[in-house]
Each structure stands twice: as C-alpha cells, then as structure tokens.
Amino acid sequence: MKKVFLTLVFMVTAAISMNAQDISDNAIGLRFGSGNGIGGEISYQKALGSNRLEIDLGLANEFSDFKATGLYQWVWNLENKFNWYAGVGAGLVSAGGTGIYGAGVVGIEYNFDAPILLSIDYRPEIGISGGLSGVNSDVALAVRYQF
C-alpha cells in the first residue's frame, strides 16, 4: 500500500511540474479597458509562486476620478508561451460616486521572447457599496514589461 501511495504522489508531482509555467517575478505596463468611465490603467503584477497578485490604478478627469483594483490570479499553462488565468479581488472607484466593488477576472496571455507580456481579459465587477451599483463588465487589452 505504501508503494502504491508513493507512486501516486510521485506521478501527481511530476504532472504538476511538467505543466508549470514561467511567470516573471514582476511585470508593469498599461491595461486598456472601458470600465466605469476609467479608460487605461497602470498595471503591476507580482509573482507569488506559480500564481500572482495584480494591482491596477486608473485615473480620469484630470486625476479627480480613480479606480483601484487588486486581484489574486491563478495561472495555468496552455501551450508553449500561452497561459490562461482566473482570479478574484476587490477595488475602489470614485467615478460617479465613491464605491467598493468585488471583481473576478479570466484571461489569456502570450509571453514573447522579449520581456513583453500581452494579454486580453474579461473582468466582471459587482458593486458592493457607494456610487457603483449592479454588475459591470470590463474587457481589456494589456501590454506589460517583465523584469
């Protein structure tokens, strides 16, 4: 029974390590979306093992309106330099009244040979309090420099 258990543990570990993706420790760039009147966002990603934390900040109307989002993302390898990811998080928005919202994200990314990461994602946002109400959707294209 021990041999069967050890063999099973070894096989699962080997399968997980074969599907491991290469995530850069840090990436910073721009995320071009359309959510809540805030167009582009400055986007920063920090690797946490094989997952990551993403923080986005958008400014509009001569910096009087902002949108700040924090997301925890799980990342999976699709093929070669393609990854897909999904995550959850929350944020603050001041466009149209200050509000707190919950957010999810699902997207796909391509990691170029140069230190450039290109991604497209869908982020549904649900208003919890303040000026943001109901469900809002945000689709965005992001370009990030990896270091």
Image: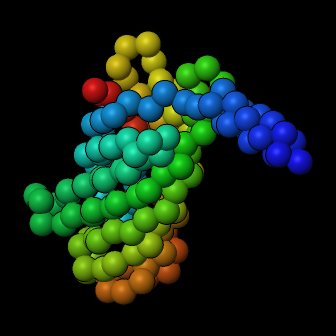
Q: Residue at x 56, y 22 (%)?
A: 81
136 sits left or right of 26 in the view: right
User: Can the viewer see residue 32 in this picture?
Assistant: no
Q: Is 128 situated above or below 57? A: below
Q: In this orientation, which residue lies closer to the viewer: 125 or 116?
A: 116
Tell whether 14 sits left or right of 39. Answer: right
Residue at the (41%, 58%) spot, across then down: 71
Residue at 62% across / 31% down in the picture? 17
Image position of 78 (left or right of 134):
right
Between 54 and 120, the one lying in front of the other is 54
Q: Residue at x 35, y 19 (%)?
A: 115
In the rendered view of the protein, which quadrant contains the C terminus? top left
* Residue 90 image position (x, y, % from top left): 39, 69
Q: Which residue ends up furthest to the front in the rendered image?
A: 2
Query: With respect to residue 109, does 57 lie above or below?
Result: below
Q: How many numbered marks does the figure carry?
A: 0
Extreme residue toward the top, this view? 113
Q: Is residue 52 left or right of residue 81?
A: left
Give coordinates of residue 44: x percent, y percent.
29, 44
Is 82 located above or below residue 86 in the figure? above
Across and down, in percent, residue 28 comes to 27, 37
Q: Position of residue 100 (x, y in %)?
A: 34, 78
Reply above or below: 102 against 145. Answer: below
